[in-house]
Image (spheres, rainbow, N blue to C red):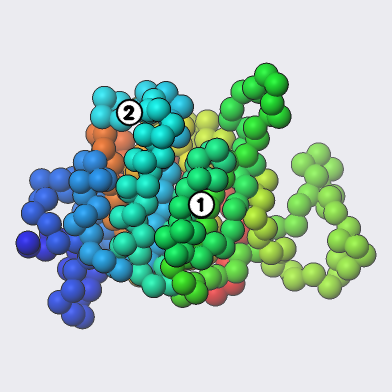
Amino acid sequence: MTPVFLDRFHKKDTNTVIESPLDNACVLETSLGALYEGDCLHLLPYVMDKSIDTVFVDPPFNLAKDYGTNVDDFRPDPEYVSWCKRWLDECVRVLKMGGAIFVYNLPKWNMILGSYLTEAGLDFRHWIAVNLKLLLPIPGRLYPSHYSLLYFTKGKPKTFQRIRTPIERCRHCGGEIKDYGGHRGAMNPNGVNLTDVWNDITPVRHWKFKSRKRSANQLSTKILERVVQMSTCKGDIVLDPFGGSGTTFDVCERLGRRWIGMEIESCDVIIERLQGKELHPHKSGDYVEG
């Protein structure tokens, strides 16, 4: 097999991250990464073992949404779980020791996928609840108001950068919402430690954040910024096998991380996003302790 392009990721030695004859699958290259158009189950086997620092996965949720002709988002439950396990196996294989994997999905599925990652020998770090009301109330059940973001590592994490978030204030009066038990004066001036419940993520609805050519949901850049900043350093490699609208790659470009992207449908929206720079990132007051 011949190296495609990722020799740039290892300029000091002869190793490559991807070995593949899939030159035609690469639809975009930047100074930091490359985007492949195709089924991740066909592309992932060409990624070398233990070559990726962080994997972020946001697959279809099996909600019968129309993502395009190449995506089956309405499978029987056992078939969907089996499909997820296939790409999870590949993601675990390509992850470096100490690397991190994040899986964004409904709690219904992440309960199963988290158990599978544990059985695969990965270390559970967090079940992050992203408080985001995008679903409708379901009769006879509690109103589902959060998405699950699993955070696992392959052994002890080689990178964990602490993130602090701004002290919450009332949007009406501007006053601080909590008194922190009377110890406000002793708190870190850079903010409070990021928790595993993220209440400050807003839906991506405004056109300055979202491509008009994509009707499906898009992730806030704030989620990906936290994932990338928490688990990687500049120059590390991030893999996203379900590229969607390209949020992961946009964040990597701005934060100086190298990346590999895959998307089974047309990548035109992603390419326009990375080349045009017309979409804005969401504002973030996070402080990263280096």
Is 33 left or right of 189, judged from the image as shown?
A: left
- On the image, the x and y values in percent for residue 28 come to 21, 48
**In front of the other: label 1 or label 2?**
1
**Label 2 Cα neighbours within 10 Å, binned few <14 / some 14-19 / many ≥20:** some
- Residue that appears at 26% across and 29% down: 70
Residue 255 spot, x, y in % from top left: 42, 61
Q: Position of residue 109 (x, y in %)?
A: 50, 40
- Who is closer to the viewer here, 278 or 159? 159
Which residue is label 1 attached to? Answer: 114
Task: Count how many numbered circles sit on residues in the image.
Answer: 2
Residue 154 coordinates in the image, percent (x, y): 44, 68
Quarter holding residue 139: top right
Q: Residue furthest right?
A: 182
- Is residue 255 something one can see in this rendering? no
Determine crowd level at label 1: few under 14, some 14-19, many 20+ residues with C-alpha closer than 10 A.
many
**Residue 218 visible in the current orientation:** yes
Badge 2 amino acid: Asp
* SS at badge 2: loop
Residue 72 bears which disc, if any? 2
The residue sitting at 60% across, 52% down in the picture is 128
Secondary structure under the numbered disc 1 in the rendered image: helix
Horizontally, is 222 left or right of 271 in the view? right
Nearest to N terminus: mark 1 or mark 2: 2
Q: Quadrant of residue 126?
A: bottom right
Outermost residue toward the bottom in this view? 12
Asked if 239 appears above or below 144 in the picture, the reply is below
Callout 1 amino acid: Gly
Which mark is on residue 238? none
Q: What residue appears at the point 21 percent right and 55 percent down from the top-left corner?
A: 45
Q: 116 or 126, which is in the foreground?
A: 116
The N terminus appears in which quarter of the rendering?
A: bottom left
